[in-house]
Image: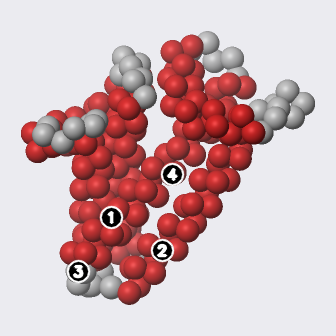
């Protein structure tokens, strides 16, 4: 029972921090302003981890690798703690692979949540155009290719649903791979 409680707490905290680090990277990649409630939340959750990691990753060109490294480190610590508390001894390579798959799973789950929020905001007139614009900027690059091949049905854009189904298929494949690796170690 205690292991289940610890696992739940580690999954919630680890998932939140990993998702925030990945969202920080993605928002920077998409050039989304952090001067909005979502951006401020992401910065508040991740700055303590990402800013020190920038000293390590500043020589690596091509984006905010400190956020990606932070996401991976959170997952690595989470799986390492779960294995240690569970009495298992994990190889470094296994923890590396499982943490990497964990980051990919959280990236997929985060994108599904972002798509859902985007859809709900597009249906409702919330009056907060800034937040709607942020979610549009986050989802548009992924939906654009699907919108080219999926026609509107009765004036309804089905591309978010198709993308969510595709993301869930990838998540199932990754979860099965991760489960096999966890059992094998």
Residue 85 x %, y %: 25, 77
Give whichever of discs 1 and 4 has the lower sequence position: 1
> How busy is the neighbourhood of tag 1: few (under 14 within 10 Å), some, or many (20 plus)?
many
Mark number for residue 177?
A: 2
Kindly identify the residue that appears in the image at 36 percent across and 22 percent down: 34
Could you tell me which secondary element the residue under label 4 belongs to? Answer: helix
Horizontally, residue 136 falls left or right of residue 74, namely: right
Kindly identify the residue that appears in the image at 13 percent across and 40 percent down: 59
> How busy is the neighbourhood of tag 4: few (under 14 within 10 Å), some, or many (20 plus)?
some
Q: Tell me the distance, in whole angstroms, between the alpha carbons under discs 4 and 3.
A: 26 Å
Residue 15 x %, y %: 39, 53
Asked if the residue under mark 4 is in contact with the one under mark 1, i.e. CB atoms within 8 Å, the reply is no
Front position in the image: 35 or 67: 67
Mark number for residue 91?
A: 3
Residue behind mark 4: 108
> How busy is the neighbourhood of tag 3: few (under 14 within 10 Å), some, or many (20 plus)?
few
Quarter of the image for residue 98 reads bottom left
Could you tell me which secondary element the residue under label 1 belongs to? Answer: helix
Give whichever of discs 1 and 2 has the lower sequence position: 1
Quarter of the image for residue 129 reads top right
Q: Tell me the distance, in whole angstroms, between the alpha carbons under discs 4 and 2.
A: 15 Å
Front position in the image: 98 or 125: 98
Residue behind mark 1: 99
Q: In the rendered view, tell whether residue 120 sits above or below residue 96.
A: above
- The reply to whether residue 145 is in sight is yes
Give whichever of discs 3 and 1 has the lower sequence position: 3
Give whichever of discs 4 and 2 has the lower sequence position: 4
């Amino acid at each position: 029972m205690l292991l289940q409680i610890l696992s739940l707490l580690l999954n919630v905290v680890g998932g939140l921090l990993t998702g925030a680090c990945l969202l920080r990277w993605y928002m920077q990649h998409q050039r989304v302003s952090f001067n909005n409630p979502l951006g401020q939340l992401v910065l508040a959750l991740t700055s303590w981890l990402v800013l020190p990691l920038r000293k390590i990753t500043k020589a690596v060109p091509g984006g905010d690798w400190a956020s990606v490294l932070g996401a991976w480190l959170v997952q690595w610590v989470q799986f390492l703690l779960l294995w240690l508390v569970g009495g298992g001894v994990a190889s470094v390579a296994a923890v590396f692979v499982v943490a990497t798959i964990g980051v990919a799973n959280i990236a997929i789950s985060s994108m599904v949540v972002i798509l859902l929020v985007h859809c709900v905001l597009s249906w409702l007139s919330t009056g907060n155009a800034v937040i709607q614009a942020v979610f549009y900027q986050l989802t548009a690059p992924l939906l654009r290719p699907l919108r080219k091949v999926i026609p509107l049905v009765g004036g309804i854009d089905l591309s978010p649903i198709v993308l969510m189904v595709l993301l869930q298929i990838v998540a199932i494949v990754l979860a099965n791979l991760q489960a096999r690796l966890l059992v094998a170690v």
